[in-house]
Amino acid sequence: MTITNILLVEDDIKTADFIKSGLRDEGFSVQYAADGKTGLKLGLEAAFSVAVVDIMLPGLDGLDLVKQLRSSGSTTPVLFLSGRKTVEDRLSGFKAGGDDYLVKPFSFAELVARLHALLRRSQPIPDNSRLTAADLQVDLLSRRVYRDSREIELQQREFSLLSYLLHHRGRVISKTMILKNVWGYNFDPQTNVVEACICRLREKIDSGTAQPLIHTVRGVGYILDKNRKKV
């Protein structure tokens, strides 16, 4: 299990102990600094999932601490803690590079909820617009298909069938499932449209390659699998 590492910079010992204890009970790993200079040093030396920074700190205040982190290239999400609650105070926190602002006194449940929100927002967004198998690549947005860097032109139905097989790669898909999800038929119209489309796809995708990808499983259906022997 991945441990979420949090940097806590808070000069009030009682508040810091309360936060550290609660976060560790929630499963977080916490590194603590009681002043701004130490907090900056830790922030520059190690990678943190989130930083919780009090604004009023000795030596170096929280705003300047975060400004220096940002100028160094740090993208660690920052949650400011402060007893100041005016709009101008909040704006100062955001302008310094903060991502959220929590006014003291606060409930611990809200602190945890805000940390989880920052963690979700900082996660990279997966690119679901590309499907691949071996050297086959399908771009769902541009609707372009490549096999070993060679672009392949597909008709609309062929593209839909290939995409469906790729979404379920490694699984045997029946003719009935293909008819329902690619053609929109909830019954078997007793035609060979699936077989004919599979045949055209094989000709375009697998012809002349040492590694066929589209296979027939006799009496069951079809599978797109780079490791399966041709049937």
Image (cartoon, rainbow, N blue to C red):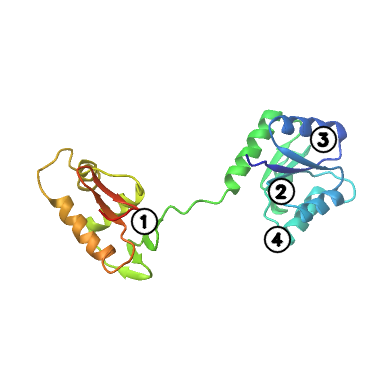
Mark pair 2, 4: CA separation: 13 Å
Q: Position of residue 96 (x, y in %)?
A: 73, 53
Where on the picture, by quarter, is residue 150?
Answer: bottom left
Task: Give SS at disc 1.
Answer: loop
Dot in front, 4 or 1: 1
Residue drawn 55% across the image and 51% down it: 124
Please tell me which residue is depicted at 60% across the width and 48% down the height of the picture. Answer: 122
| SS at mark 2 in the image | loop
Mark 2 or mark 1: whose residue is earlier in sequence: 2
The outermost residue toward the right is 59
Provide residue 193's location: percent of width, then percent of height. 14, 51
Task: Identify the secondary structure beneath mark 3.
Answer: helix
Please say whether residue 155 is visible from this viewpoint: no
Query: Which residue is found at the position 21% from the left and 46% from the top?
Result: 218
Crowd class of label 3 (few under 14; some 14 to 19; many from 20; radius 10 Å) = some
| CA gap, disc 1 and disc 3 | 54 Å
- Amino acid type assigned to the residue bearing label 1 in the image: Lys
Q: Which residue is mark 3?
A: 16
| Count of marks, rendered view | 4
Task: Determine which of the numbered discs, if any, sits on residue 226 in the image.
Answer: 1
Relative to 45, residue 184 above or below:
above
Q: Nearer the viewer, residue 59 or 50?
A: 50
Left or right side of 19 for 123: left
Q: Which residue is mark 2?
A: 48
- On the rendered structure, is 137 left or right of 66? left
Q: Earlier in the sequence, mark 4 or mark 1?
A: 4
* Within-10-Å neighbours for mark 4: few <14, some 14–19, many 20+: few
Q: Nearer the viewer, mark 1 or mark 3?
A: 1
Crowdedness near tag 1: few (<14), some (14–19) or many (≥20) residues, C-alpha within 10 Å: some
Residue 73 — which label? Answer: 4
